[in-house]
Image: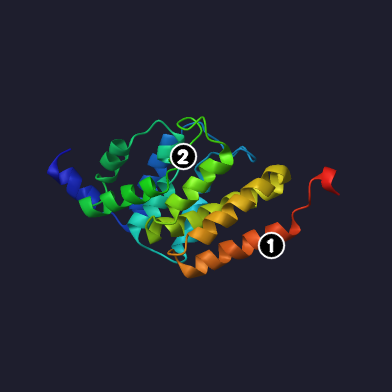
Amino acid sequence: MCVAQKFCFMNRSKNEVLKYIKEFSDRCHGEQVRKYTGERYIVHPVRVMESVREFNDDVAVLAAALLHDVLEDTPVKAHEIESALLLVMDTNDAKRTLRFVTDLTDIFIKKDFPGLKRSLRKEKEVKRLSSVSPEAQTIKYADIIDNVTDIVKQDTDFARVYVREAKAMLTAMKHGHPELLKRAVTLIDTCLLTLPEPAHTV
């Protein structure tokens, strides 16, 4: 890319930058769809970004919200994300965005830890998430809110599992935006109170 083209990209408005990153994230997710609704996967990162934007307008944080599942759920590598970001961001913001995305990428996944039960893998993720950046924790609050809203509507059996896991995550993650944390905790606590018990226990 020539210097003139780079300069043009770097002078985009914040909304133009986020539009570019949204389109990049959408391409990364390819044909993936949301499990319960069949919508293109990108609708979830966009909703997460919009929730975060109520409390944090930092372009690196918003970009990370749009990209938060890319490393975990697609073949795209970190260096490819960074290269894309450097087209529209300065080096500092690109590196911060990538750090937040890395913070939000599960490490203890079944493929890499086949000998660990889901409950133990999730315990290890909770411990890891407790020490990630406040910005990443804020994004995770919004991610939980969006995920639980879909899951509770569509799959009450799995919702009982996910809501308890989400409660553990929120209990451990205390450094993100307090108002968004409060919103997430209220939603999770409401779900814990209102989800029906399995049929065999009633």
Residue 108 x, y percent position in the rendering: 46, 39
Residues under labels 2 and 1: Cα distance? Answer: 28 Å
Q: What element carries label 1?
A: helix
Name the residue type under label 1: Thr
Of callouts 2 and 1, the N-terminal one: 2
| 116, above or below 133, in the image | above
| 55, above or below 45, in the image | below
Name the residue type under label 2: Phe
Q: Which of 109 and 72 is in front in this view?
A: 109
The residue at the point 65 percent across, 46 percent down is 161
Q: Residue 44 carries which label?
A: none
Residue 184 x, y percent position in the rendering: 57, 61
The residue at the point 43 percent across, 33 percent down is 74
Q: Mark 1 points at which residue?
A: 190
Q: Which of marks 2 and 1 is in front?
A: 2
The quadrant in which residue 188 appears is bottom right
Can the viewer see residue 113? yes
- Crowd band around label 1 with a 10 angstrom C-alpha radius: few (<14), some (14–19), many (20+): few
Q: Nearer the viewer, residue 33 or 14?
A: 33
Q: Nearer the viewer, residue 46 or 172?
A: 172
Identity of the residue furthest to the bottom in this view? 179
Q: Which quadrant holds the N terminus?
A: top left
Can the viewer see residue 148? no
Q: Is mark 2 on a helix, strand or loop?
A: loop
Q: Name the residue under label 2.
A: 108
The residue at the point 51 percent across, 31 percent down is 31
